[in-house]
Amino acid sequence: MKKDYPNICHSFDIWHGTKNLGKKIMSIEQESNKKELLPWTKDIMNHFWHAAQVSDTYETFIGIWFGLLHHVTDEHEWILSYSDNGINACQHGPLTEERTKGWLKKDSPAHIALRHVVMDKRRLNQIHYYLNCRSTAELENFQNLILVYASKRYSYGPPTYRARNRLAALDHNGHLERETKINKDGSVRYQRSFNKKSGIWSVHELKEDKTYNYIQSLVEKIVRRRLDDEEGMSGNVVLEADDPRRISKTLARIPPPPTAQLVKERKSRFEDPDKTLDYSWDS
């Protein structure tokens, strides 16, 4: 890709990169002397995302990312920068006294394990693919919405499948700019969710309910088109030029044999034990 398309900016999905980082940290937390890393899992993942989001160069990313090793030990300034950007302090504001998360002891087993993860050469060699902070989350959300209208459990003809995809697109576009739900006191309403694997609670904003305002107009146009159709539903169906059924009626690589032949072979196979068993009765 880099050789054939040098002018295209290639990126990795920041969400998957952050998720893989979280899996690595959680695997370390299973060891008894490193469990104090557990409360920091979400913060480490967020810091990786933040570093990729605000960094334009590899050097800037390193300066911010490596600072995590100091922050978790309650050290928020250090003497030398890890790169030429001169970053030698945390970028956050004043810490509150209400925090309950314990600090890691410097050079403790948990801190050393975290250092290996943060400075992992394989991950650092891929950092330039994350600097654009691109994510396919919105596309994946749309794909999940398509499955609501066109479930994989059922088969659809090409026109039906196309129509269901368009309904999903109308649903997506019609509710893209929904407002966040507000409580009576004016605060934003949140929904809690628990991750069994990480053992961490998280929250997300609740959006206003969908209205489907476009449905009434859509139904009216469908009915009007049917009423104006002089041919009716009894007319012959003509396949479109790009309909894949023009190529083959099925997805099989070989044409199907007659049904009667398949039934005959099925009956003979069950009537003859030698065709159904792969072992000998004499053994």
Image: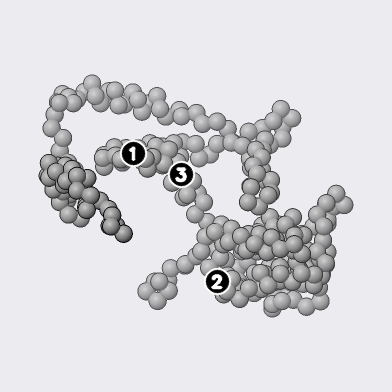
How many other residues sit within 10 Å of disc 1, few (<14), some (14-19) or many (≥20)?
few
Q: What residue is pinned by disc 3?
A: 144
Report the front residue among 163 and 283.
Answer: 283
Q: Which SS class for mark 3?
A: helix
Q: In this rendering, which labeled residue sits more in front, label 3 or label 1?
A: 1
Q: Is residue 167 above or below residue 57?
A: above
Q: Are marks 2 and 1 in contact (CB under 8 Å)?
A: no
Which numbered disc flags the more N-terminal residue, 2 or 1? 2
Residue at image mark 1? 154
Q: Earlier in the sequence, mark 2 or mark 3?
A: 2
- Estimate the x, y position of residue 134 in percent, counting from the top left: 53, 59
Residue at image position (72%, 35%) is 187
Q: Residue at x 71, y 76 (%)?
A: 82
Q: Quadrant of residue 208?
A: top right
Three-letter code, disc 1: Tyr
- Please tell me how many numbered marks the rendered image carries: 3
In percent of width and height, residue 163 lies at: 32, 37
Q: Nearer the viewer, residue 131 or 28?
A: 28
Quarter of the figure with residue 280 = bottom left
